[in-house]
Amino acid sequence: MIDKNSPLPIYAQLEEQIKERIESGNLKPGDGLPSEREYCERYGISRMTVRQAINNLVNDGYLRREKGKGTYVAEKKLEQQLQGLTSFTEDMKARGMEPSSTLLHFEIVPAPESIAQLLSVGQHEPVYRIRRIRLADGKPMALETSHIPANLVPGLTPDIVAGSLYQYIEERLRYPIDHSNQVIESAAAGEMESRHLSIPAGCPILLIQRDTFLKDGTPIETVKSAYRADRYKFVTTIRR
Ligand code: 16G
């Protein structure tokens, strides 16, 4: 099924074929790919051509390589809408996945200067510092560090943040969460992200800073999240 007379280069044809097999469900996440040699023999093409096709699919996130083992079909990335202000718990439930959290830190600390500014509280005023691994169906998706003004959000406990913070703020405290400013940028996983997200250090991650406000403009949280770039993509509709 490789057409050597086609204007489409051979590596691109092979790439399309593998992609098609993944998209049609013929090849499923976790399935191993035939070896480069098998592809060469099956299609009568060079090893370099096969390698180029496979490299492109690895770079595009369709495949992943495991050192010394082989090449596998990657998990599909989750599509995260950028339009709505939703919580991790809501996002995962909407996908039919089970959200959970591993709580790494829960403490009240005097606000460091940068945090005090973002939360519009006095320097050294108490803030919660909460670090959670956010998991979907038991698999780590993001590492999240939140700062929340302690005087504004009374009664927060480790048990509550093991569930949904937004649910507590809206349903128990009845505060109207209104809008966030959000910045997304790429970075490389450091030692901490690597350990908690089960990815090699140096792997790409998506860093998100979210500052959230109540209806009257009071800041309610400032959060830094590291999302696995191999499991997430952000999508939005834009108009003109
Ligand atoms: C999301 C938010 C985070 C918020 C959390 C609340 C991003 C980048 N971050 O993870 O700012 O604190 O949801 O989730 O989306 P929860 O209600 O499940 O605790």
Image (cartoon, grey):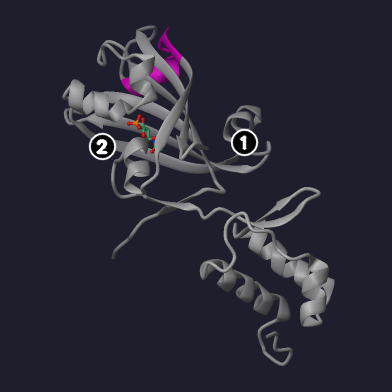
- Frontmost residue, 204 versus 132: 132
Q: Residue visible at 55% across and 46% down?
A: 229
In the picture shown, does residue 84 fall above or below 162? below
- Frontmost residue, 104 versus 182: 104
Question: Image quadrant of ligand 1?
Answer: top left
- In the image, what residue type sits under mark 1? Ser
The percent coordinates of residue 194 (x first, y second) are 63, 33
Whether residue 111 appears in magenta in the rendering, the answer is: yes
Labels 1 and 2 touching (C-beta < 8 A): no
On residue 179, the disc is 2
- In the image, what residue type sits under mark 2? His
On residue 198, the disc is 1
- Frontmost residue, 128 versus 200: 200
In the picture shown, does residue 73 fall above or below 180? below
The percent coordinates of residue 97 (x first, y second) are 40, 44
Q: Secondary structure at mark 2?
A: strand
Q: Residue visible at 43% across and 19% down?
A: 130
Instruction: For residue 117, say whether it is visible.
Output: no
Instruction: For residue 106, say whether it is visible.
Output: yes
Image quadrant containing the N terminus: bottom right
Question: Which mark sits nearer the N-terminus, 1 or 2?
Answer: 2
